[in-house]
Each structure stands twice: as structure tokens, then as C-alpha cells.
Amino acid sequence: MSRFSLDGTRAFVTGANTGIGQAIAVDLARHGAHVVAVGRSSMEETLQAVAQASGRADVVQADLGSVAGAVAAFDEAGSRFGPIDTLVNNAGIIRRADSLDFTEADWDAVMDINLKVVFFLSQAFARSRIAAGQGGSIVNIASLLSFQGGIRIPSYTASKSGVAGLTKTLSNEWSAKGITVNAVAPGYVISNNTEALRADPERNRAILDRIPMGRWAEPVDIAGAVTFLASPAARYVTGITLPVDGGWLGR
Ligand code: NAP
């Protein structure tokens, strides 16, 4: 069996209906994982893409803006489909405004889904794996804003920098129990998240000029790194935030 195979494993992927999460769901399924696609919107497109890749996916509907909803979805997945081997914390939001005007509501909404829910889903996952005497893998979706400051996105940068730190602390606690904890930091990816940037010709040009590869990423460009980190091939990789950015951070 290939050391990159996920045959016989089950993966819980948040925000799997679109964008990066959808590409991750399809790639994990293509490599043999049974995917549980989790989110609040229709997963029809994802289910079709997984079927086209000859993979298997099921759906759990959940609003991931609250810890209670997210953990209930994790428990539901376990009881309906069986134990989860891989947790992919992908769902996330961004709110843009000058820091002088930034509201508490925009701070809380972003921190809740991008960081707080990531922690408590990870806790639910690790509790279930450790109680079963099993290992597993957590892959968080971080950002270039885990390394850089950005502009007009204070809660997003705080949350994604938090994800990189959390990835390290959870790895320190759980890797000896067989749970690897890593993050993937996508560069600039074509998705709903970046619609505003791509619609602004000046920002779009400035971004493209800085990317050594000279193009935006497609969601599928991010998925391979997640599949790798979930696979036995990455069993000695833990605590890292892996940039997948077309060379951006090297500039
Ligand atoms: P996206 O298309 O906006 O996807 C965000 C996902 O999160 C969607 O599935 C969305 O579901 C889900 N989500 C948001 N709030 C939710 C809620 N309350 N309950 C359930 N699901 C919720 O953008 P994306 O680019 O694929 O983003 C995926 C991840 O990559 C995010 O963590 C983002 O921060 C990160 N990222 C993106 C980029 C980029 O350039 N695009 C770069 C670095 C990191 P709905 O469709 O139902 O809203």
C-alpha cells in the first residue's frame, strides 16, 4: 500500500461545500478516505465531485460559528459513520475594515469560527482518539497571516496567528499519543474569501506582482499538502505550519 494512501480512514472536513474545503474533501476521498463533509450550506457539488473521483463522502449539516454546534456535529459524525481519524479545520471567515473602525461583532465572529471552534473541535477529536487508544491527524488551515500582519484584517490575522500557535501547543501535548497536529498556510487562493481582493484591479496586480509563480492558487493546489499531512507518509511531521504559497514568503 502506498504510504500516501488514506484507505480505511475517515476524515471530518469543515467548510467542505466550496473553495479550499471542497478541494480538500475531494483530494482526501481520491486518496481513499471516507469524507464527512461538514457545514451549513448544500454539499451537493462536493458530493458529486467526490463521486466523480470514485470516492466516498457523507454530510453532516452544522453551523460552525459556535462551539456547541461544531462539537455536536463531530459527535453526530462519530455515531453515524464511526470514528474519525483525520480532522481538517478548514471553515473560516474574514472581515475587512480599518482597525480604527473595527467592531467587536467582527472581532468575535472571526475569532469564534477561525480559532475558538478550531480548538474545541481539536479537543473533541483528541479526546475520542485518546480514549480509543488510537492516533490520528489534525490539519488546520492557517494563512500567510499566520506569519505576516496584513492590513485591515485585525481579527483574521489574530485568529490565523493563533492557529499557528495552537498547532504547536496541541502538537506538544498530543504527538506522543500518536496524534500529529499540523497546519497548512495557503497563499492567495481563488475562492469566495478573496473575491473582494480579486475584484480590485490595483490590489490584484500588487498581489500577482509579489507571487514568484505569478498566479493565484487554485483550491486544488492547497489540497495536496493536506492529504500529505493526513497520510502515513507524514507520520513524523508535527507542529508545523506549511506554507503553500507559490513562493510568496520567500520574497
Ligand atoms: P470560502 O470559499 O469563503 O470558504 C469558507 C468556508 O467556511 C465555507 O465552506 C463556508 O461555508 C465555511 N463557513 C464559514 N462560516 C461558517 C459557519 N458559521 N458555519 C459553517 N461553515 C462556515 O473561502 P476559502 O478560501 O475556501 O477558505 C477556507 C479556509 O482557507 C479558511 O479558513 C480561510 O481563512 C483559509 N484561507 C483562505 C485563503 C484564500 O486565499 N482563499 C488564504 C489563506 C487561508 P458557507 O459557504 O456556508 O459560508
Image: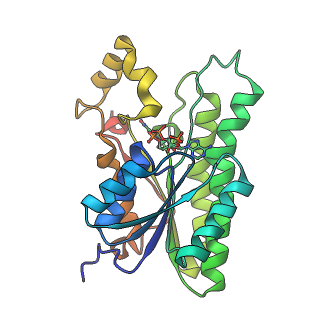
How is the protein colored in the picture?
rainbow
In this picture, residue 173 sits left or right of residue 144: right
User: How far from the left and from the top, in percent, is residue 90?
Assistant: 50, 51
For the image, the number of numbered tags is 0
Q: Residue furthest right?
A: 104
**Taking the image as drawn, is residue 118 in sight?**
yes
Give coordinates of residue 82: x percent, y percent.
Answer: 54, 79
| Position of 7 relative to 46 (above/below) | below
Report whether residue 225 is seen. no
Residue 39 x %, y %: 55, 51
136 versus 139 height, above or below: below
- What residue is rendered at 23% in x and 29% in y? 214
- Quadrant placement of the C terminus: top left
Question: Quarter of the image holding residue 25?
Answer: bottom left
Which residue is at a point 30% across and 48% down the rendered structure image? Answer: 220
> Which residue corresponds to the image point at 61% horizontal and 45% vertical from the top-left?
114
In the rendered structure, the answer to whether residue 137 lies left or right of residue 126 reads left
Residue 149 versus residue 152 in the image, above or below: below
The answer to which of 18 and 114 lies nearer the viewer is: 18
- Which image quarter is the N terminus in? bottom left
Q: Residue furthest top?
A: 202
Of the pair 167 and 39, the residue shown nearer to us: 39
Judge left or right: residue 68 versus residue 78: right
- Rendering coords of residue 76 (x, y %): 63, 68
Identify the residue shown where x is 67% and y is 68%. 124
